[in-house]
Structure formats: C-alpha cells, structure tokens
Image (spheres, rainbow, N blue to C red):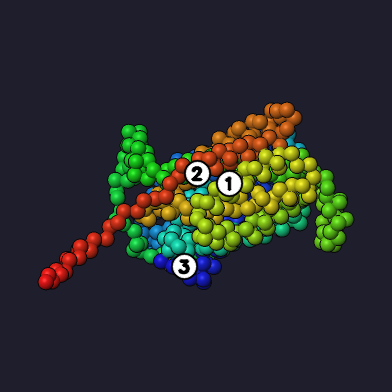
C-alpha cells in the first residue's frame, strides 16, 4: 500500500499529539517532580516514557492488535480507548496543589499513582499506532513517511516547550490541559483520516509464533522459536536495549543537568550577542526557563533533521544511517558531559539531534524490513519490551550515580553513561544482517532447447 499526502498528514496528527506528551514527560515532568522529591531514581522512573511493568504488557498488546478486527480497524481501538483516559488523568494531576518545599509532599503518593497509570495507559495506545504505519505503507516509502510523521512529533514537542517557557512558572495547569486536549484531538484525526485495510498483503498468519499458553515453559519455547525464526530482528531488539539504556540515562535528567550544572553561564553573553532574544522577553528568565529553552532548541534541531534522515535512510540504507546516528550521538554525549556554558551545550546539541533523529526515524522501518508483515504488532510490542528494559535499568543506574555524586560529577555522569552504551550499540548493530527473503512465486519451466538442424 502507499500512503497518500492527506493520509500522511492525518497519521502525523497522532505524532504531533504524542510529541506534546513526550515533551511534557521528558523535559517538564522532572521539574514538576523535583517539587515533591530529591530522589533521582524516583524522578527518572516517573519521567521516563516507558516503565518496567510495560515490558510485560506491550508484547501482549502488540500481538493482540495483529489478530483482532473491529468496525474501527485493527489498531485504532487501542489508541481511541487509551488516549481519553490519559487526558482525564493529566487534567486531574494538573489540578493537584504542589508543595511549598520538597519536604512537604502532601499529595506525593497520589501524584505517583496518577503518573504511573497515565504512563501505562498511554503506551497501550501508542504501540498499535506505530504498527499502523507499516500496515498502510509500502516498504520503499516507509523511510520518508516515517520522517514526515516524526516531523509532526517534533512540531508537537516544540509547541509544548514554547508554551512551557512562558506558562510553566505562572500557569502550569494550562500546560497539562494542552497535552490532554492534544491527545484526544490528534488521535481522533488519525482514526478519521487513516483507513485501515482489513486484508493486509502479508503471508498467512503463523499461529504457532505466539505462545497460546502463558506457562513459563511456553514462554521459553516462544523465545527460542523467536530467535530461531527471526534471528536478525531479535538481534536488532538487543541493539535497541543498549541504545535505550544510553539515551534514557540522560533524557529524564536533561533539564535538571542544564539547570543545576550549567545554570545561566554564557546566557548573558548570548543575550548581548543576539538582541532579538531580549526583545522576545528572554533576557530575565531563570535557569529553569533557560533549560526549557535549550530543550526547545534541541527539538528544533531534531525537526530539521527529520525529513533528511528519512531520505538518507531510503537512499543509502536504513542500517547505515541508523548506525551512523548512534555513533555520532555516542561520541558527542561524551563531550557533552563536560559542557560548561549554554553556547557550548547548544553546539553539541546539533550532533546529538542528528543521532537521536536518525534512530527515531529509522528504527521502526528498519525493523519492519527484517520481519514478516503479519507480525508487525507483535514486534512493535517486543520493541517496547526492549526499550522498557533498557530504560528501566538505565534509570536505576543513572539515578543511583547522581544520588551518590561520584567524583563530584553528579548530573554529568549521565552523559558519560549515555556515550558508552550508544557506542556499544554501534558495535552490536554490525552483527545484524539483512533479512533473507524466500522466493514463494512458482518457478517458470525451463525453456526447451530448440533443435538445430544438422546438415
């Protein structure tokens, strides 16, 4: 199938809505939670877009979305039911009063419960949405369509950060409200604008691929069969575990790193060099707002890289650009650990943005090239499992290292951890081979040689 331009726009509306949520979770939620606690493990866990319990749920959700069919489609029932619930919980959390000091967390446990639930429900809806792109595109256009969809996601993140820079310290509830309404509207547009095909051009479903019984023995057998029949895709999931470990060591703490380690160093010089910043009312903002502004610049850079990364993946190979992005990001992360000013970290973000955009745009379509089309939902869930496992362990390690403040590095340690694991992922992806497609078309009969007359 080929996705038309209007339907590409409709699909991208879901990415725009998800972008609102991801920007809030990644860049703002840590600032919000720091009002309740100084425990960095807890802050990292709640600020992560994936949590441990989702590693058990998402593979089941993905496989289920492969098998069902309803009047609204195969994937749509999941995000249409999940996103309104997330919206209600976001609004509820936004109405809770915040403590005057972190030592007086009056509603702390209610905050933890609410964030835990809306994170879980959001991911139940988002993975079938990701699988939908493979259902409605042809292999040769997936890189470009994924790039345009990710462009919508970056626009959503940028939109929310612009609002947060000016509203978070004055009217924080409006930020919660924008995310909630955006989720309902964006995924509603997806359901209305993207028609799911009932019959997919995939090979017949192998019902033995997914374990029918939930016993430990059946699960072990499923894992063995998975590696035996889908070896290269399974390797790629291992690569995702490594690079998600690296990325999530830094992502939940990025704004705290900028606020607490760099602060306003270099900011007055930037204001004097670029007068339009002062004219925009940014001359007197505090360190938290500067951290959000730097995060906004990071997203703008990713937005600019989105379409080029998709094109580069289609032109030079998804694996090659994917690996290049991980390598550039890993090396730059090691340099970023020792950034001391705002201009310096902004320079490093140019290269970090390329690496992050390359893996964001290309992983899903690269994985799709390695798996049978009738197992897209299942592998989307398994991909979430790999991401969740990497994120969860990373948050524990990074949070503990920050709390211990080893060698006085505190938040700088997260970028060192990020760089090491991204470079390990670059090494690991070299062992992923191209999928060997088996020819299933009937072979033409061998031509009968024409007798040549003899004289």
For the residues labelled 2 and 1, say whether their Cβ atoms are less than 8 Å apart.
yes
Q: Which residue is mark 1?
A: 326
**Camera-side residue of 353 and 121:** 353
Q: Earlier in the sequence, mark 2 or mark 3?
A: 3
Q: Which residue is mark 3?
A: 3
Q: Position of residue 401 (x, y in %)?
A: 66, 31
Give the residue displayed 55% in from the left and 61% down from the top.
311
Q: Would residue 365 appear left or right of 258 to someone viewing this image? A: left
Q: Position of residue 343 (x, y in %)?
A: 78, 49
Residue count near mark 2 (Cα–Cα under 10 Å), binned few <14, some 14–19, many ≥20: many
Mark 2 to mark 1: distance in Å? 10 Å
For the residues labelled 3 and 1, say whether their Cβ atoms are less than 8 Å apart.
no
Q: How many numbered tags mark residues here?
A: 3
Q: Nearer the viewer, mark 3 or mark 1?
A: 1
Residue count near mark 1 (Cα–Cα under 10 Å), binned few <14, some 14–19, many ≥20: many
Q: Which residue is mark 2?
A: 429
Give the residue displayed 55% in from the left and 53% down from the top.
321
**Camera-side residue of 376 and 43:** 376
- Which residue appears farthest toward the front when viewing the image? 455
Q: Would residue 245 appear left or right of 365 to someone viewing this image? A: right
For the residues labelled 2 and 3, say whether their Cβ atoms are less than 8 Å apart.
no
């Amino acid at each position: 199938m080929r996705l038309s331009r209007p339907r590409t726009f409709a699909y991208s509306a879901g990415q725009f809505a998800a972008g609102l949520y991801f920007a809030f979770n990644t860049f703002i939620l840590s600032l919000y939670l720091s009002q309740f606690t100084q425990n960095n493990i807890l802050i990292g866990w709640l600020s992560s877009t994936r949590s441990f319990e989702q590693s058990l749920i998402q593979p089941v959700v993905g496989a289920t979305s492969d098998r069902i069919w309803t009047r609204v489609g195969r994937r749509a029932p999941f995000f249409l039911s999940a996103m309104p619930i997330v919206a209600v919980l976001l609004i509820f959390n936004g109405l809770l009063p915040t403590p005057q000091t972190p030592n007086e967390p009056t509603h702390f446990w209610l905050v933890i419960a609410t964030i835990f639930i809306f994170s879980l429900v959001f991911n139940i809806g988002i993975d079938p949405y990701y699988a939908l792109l493979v259902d409605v595109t042809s292999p040769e256009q997936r890189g470009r369509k994924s790039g345009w969809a990710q462009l919508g996601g970056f626009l959503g993140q940028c939109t929310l950060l612009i609002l947060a820079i000016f509203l978070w310290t004055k009217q924080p509830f409006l930020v919660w409200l924008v995310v909630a309404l955006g989720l309902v509207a964006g995924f509603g547009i997806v359901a209305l604008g993207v028609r799911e095909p009932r019959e997919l051009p995939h090979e017949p479903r192998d019902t033995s691929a997914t374990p029918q019984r939930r016993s430990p023995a059946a699960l072990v057998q499923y894992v063995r069969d998975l590696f035996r029949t889908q070896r290269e895709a399974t390797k790629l999931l291992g690569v995702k575990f490594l690079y998600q470990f690296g990325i999530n060591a830094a992502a939940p703490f990025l704004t705290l790193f900028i606020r607490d380690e760099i602060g306003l160093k270099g900011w007055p010089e930037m204001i004097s060099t670029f007068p339009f910043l002062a004219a925009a009312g940014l001359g007197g903002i505090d360190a938290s707002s500067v951290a959000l502004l730097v995060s906004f610049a990071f997203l703008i850079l990713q937005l600019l890289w989105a379409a080029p990364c998709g094109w580069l993946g289609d032109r030079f190979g998804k694996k090659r650009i994917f690996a290049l992005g991980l390598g550039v990001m890993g090396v730059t992360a090691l340099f970023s650990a020792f950034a001391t000013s705002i201009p310096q970290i902004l320079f490093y973000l140019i290269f970090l943005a390329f690496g992050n955009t390359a893996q964001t745009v290309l992983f899903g379509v690269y994985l799709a090239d390695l798996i049978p089309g009738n197992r897209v939902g299942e592998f989307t869930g398994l991909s979430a499992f790999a991401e969740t496992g990497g994120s969860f362990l990373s948050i524990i390690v990074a949070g503990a290292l920050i709390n211990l403040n080893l060698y006085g590095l505190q938040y700088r340690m997260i970028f060192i951890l990020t760089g090491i694991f991204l470079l390990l992922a670059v090494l690991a992806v070299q062992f992923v081979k191209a999928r060997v497609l088996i020819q299933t078309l009937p072979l033409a009969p061998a031509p009968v040689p024409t007798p040549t007359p003899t004289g």
